[in-house]
Amino acid sequence: MNKVSDRLNNLSISETLAMTDKSRQLQAKGIDIINLSIGEPDFNTPDHIKQAAQKAIDDNFTHYTPVQGFADLRQAISNKFKNENNLDYAPDQIIVSTGAKQSLANVILCLANKDDDVLIPAPFWVSYSEIVKLAEAKSVIIKTNIEDKFKVTPQQIEEAITPKTKIFLFNSPSNPSGSLYSKEELKAIADVFAKHNDIFVISDEIYEHINFIGKHESIGQFENIKDQVIIVNGVSKSYAMTGWRIGYIGAPKWIAQACKKLQGQITSGASSISQKAACAALNGGLDTVYEMKEVFRKRRDLVFKLLSEIRGIKTFVPDGAFYFFPDISFFFGKSVDKITINNATDLCMYLLNNAHVATVTGSAFGDPNCIRLSYATSEDNIIEALKRIKTALDKLN
């Protein structure tokens, strides 16, 4: 008899990965699917990073690594925090993990007790609430709206805080909305938590360099909450290194040590070759990052133009990341050929099966009125995908 644990039964499948799997199944049948569901850059890892990995193999960096990460990589991360973010994290405050997702899980599992509250503004990345479930804590979702670019206000946060609140978890730039917080907005949020110094702030900054309006701002810069903040980041998005699986945190030393203890019992150290590649990425300058960002900017403008030509779509120009998160509730209750759209999930399946375009339901991100579109694909794919979407949506009445 197969009977998995209650822990696993309570966990939801990642909707982004599930849609990618469905797309691949249809592609395997010879159907031309354009995938706007996947959240990774479509660029190859820059050559100087690959060369560093090849050298690491030749130099026999093929053995177990320190749980917390190689010293040279942690120093590179410390330098990156200082030079790019004006944040002071010594190497012993940094833990390297197998991706930012593991970094998030480490921190939440180290800080959250059973039935603690974790405040999460919606929309949010799909894994946030599921990792909170694994910690046996409770996600307290703070609703935002498209008119405010899905950004939470200090007042909303203050009203959500209770004696059970342990963590505030957010990301900027945002997956799925592409929104980002200004320095002034982050300062106002920091001032809320300065009054509640028993609450920790986890700031997911994985998309920091895909920022179309200026310098990235981190909530970790404010002295009044410095000891409450944990920064989560990695090399996946900025350096097109998703498959290398390297993430990291900067945190108060005691939290870093707790994460080291936990990781030591689960995965131990991250891949030696990947760490050497990540070191080259962080030490190699940002030229390739900026080149990639400008391509994303051009695609963003193209997607906005094409989305604006579709009746019933409500959206805005995102300031970062590589996603749109349009409100598509206009189509709820509309039908064609005995297909009725009752919710965002229905619309995603309609687009997959009839327009052959893969998107992700907003329900997975905490907003059932929206869908997520990734523009981490070619301009030709974007133009064709939006053409197909418009044709399919125009049939609904």
Image (cartoon, grey):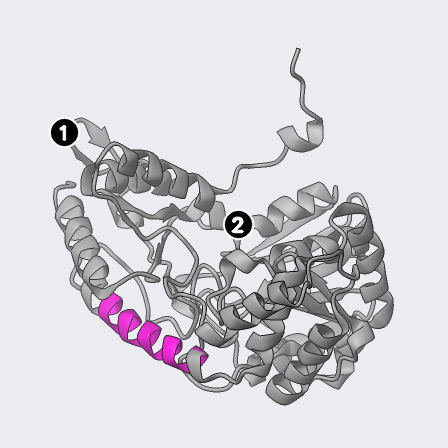
Relative to 395, 120 lies left or right: right
Where is 197 relative to 25, above or below? below
Relative to 204, 25 lies left or right: left
Where is 33 relative to 58, above or below? above
Q: Provide the secondary structure element on which disc 1 rests.
A: loop
Residue type marked 1: Asp
The span picked out in magenta is: 289-304
Measured as percent of width and height from the top left, residue 80 is found at 64, 82
**Which residue does the numbered mark 2 point to in the structure image?**
126
C-alpha separation, residue under disc 1 versus residue under disc 2: 32 Å
**Which residue does the numbered mark 1 point to in the structure image?**
337
Measured as percent of width and height from the top left, residue 158 is found at 67, 66
User: What is the quadrant of the N terminus in the image?
Assistant: top right
Q: Provide the secondary structure element on which disc 2 rests.
A: helix
Which of the 4 quarters of the picture holds residue 66? bottom right
Measured as percent of width and height from the top left, residue 304 is found at 25, 68
Q: Examine the rendering and report whether any part of residue 204 can be seen.
A: no
Q: Nearer the viewer, residue 86 or 307?
A: 86
